[in-house]
Amino acid sequence: MDPSQPPAYWCPLGEGRLVRNDSNGVHYTCDVCHGYAISIWLLGELLVEGAGAAMWRSSEGAPTHGVPCPSCRQPMAEVAVSAAVVPEPGPPLEICRACELVWIGHAASVLLPVLPVLDETGAAAPGPTHCPNCGAVYLDTDGGRCRYCRAEIEAAHVGAAAPEVAREVADAHLKAMLPDPHDDWVGDYIEREGKR
């Protein structure tokens, strides 16, 4: 494998190569079945607290049934969405513990408990994957135009993207842990020690 080339991901349902989509964090989408592959760690940032971890725990020791991982092509563990995060039974998710990759079919995608701020877009925001004019694969790096026919490609508007939401949550958590910059805790410490 050439390290300078991006990895190739394939639809586990046999629909061909997946297309990289950066519209809500990096994931790989199938144009035909509308499923997508996403790392368990990014998925965990998109879902309500604890849902990603519950899915990961559910996959440990779960039976593998032959649907191949989009990356390593080994059988993935089938995890029922209901067992992991929602009370209603639903279609399964496929998890490859070796690659830390989750395959989410289109039907399972709507059942995921995404963060409320991402409710409009879901876990994987719909970004363009092919030119509507000529059908060529479209990448976000093509500058809004098809690289072949130069047709303008309208990108989906994402009000709140997962990386920004995760960054805001992390910043708020860090801010809560840090001392108030207006407190003179060093001076208070020196004063307390001087009184001993």
Image (cartoon, grey):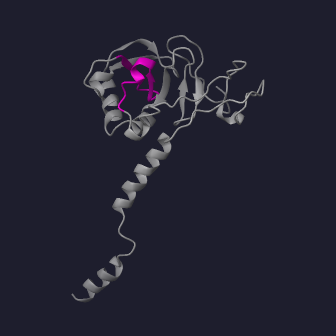
Q: Residue at x 49, y 25 (%)?
A: 37
Name the residue furthest bottom.
Answer: 195
Q: Quadrant of residue 137?
A: top right
Figure quadrant of the C terminus: bottom left
User: Looking at the rendering, which quadrant does residue 117 occupy?
Assistant: top left
Residue 183, percent from left and from top: 35, 76
Picture coordinates of residue 148 (x, y %)?
78, 24
| Quadrant of image for the N terminus | top right
Please name the residue shown 45% across and 19% down the image: 106
- In this orientation, which residue lies closer to the viewer: 87 or 54? 87
Span highlighted in magenta in the image: 91-113
Q: Please indicate whether residue 173 sits to the left or right of residue 196 in the image.
A: right
53 or 64: nearer the viewer? 53
Q: Residue at x 78, y 24 (%)?
A: 149
The part of the image, by quadrant, that contains residue 14 is top right
Nearer to me, 40 or 91: 91
Residue pushed farthest left? 196
194 relative position to 122: left or right = left
Q: Is residue 175 visible?
A: yes
Q: Nearer the viewer, residue 159 or 148?
A: 159
Q: In this rendering, would 54 be left or right of 145?
A: left
Vertical placement of residue 133 versus 23, above or below: above
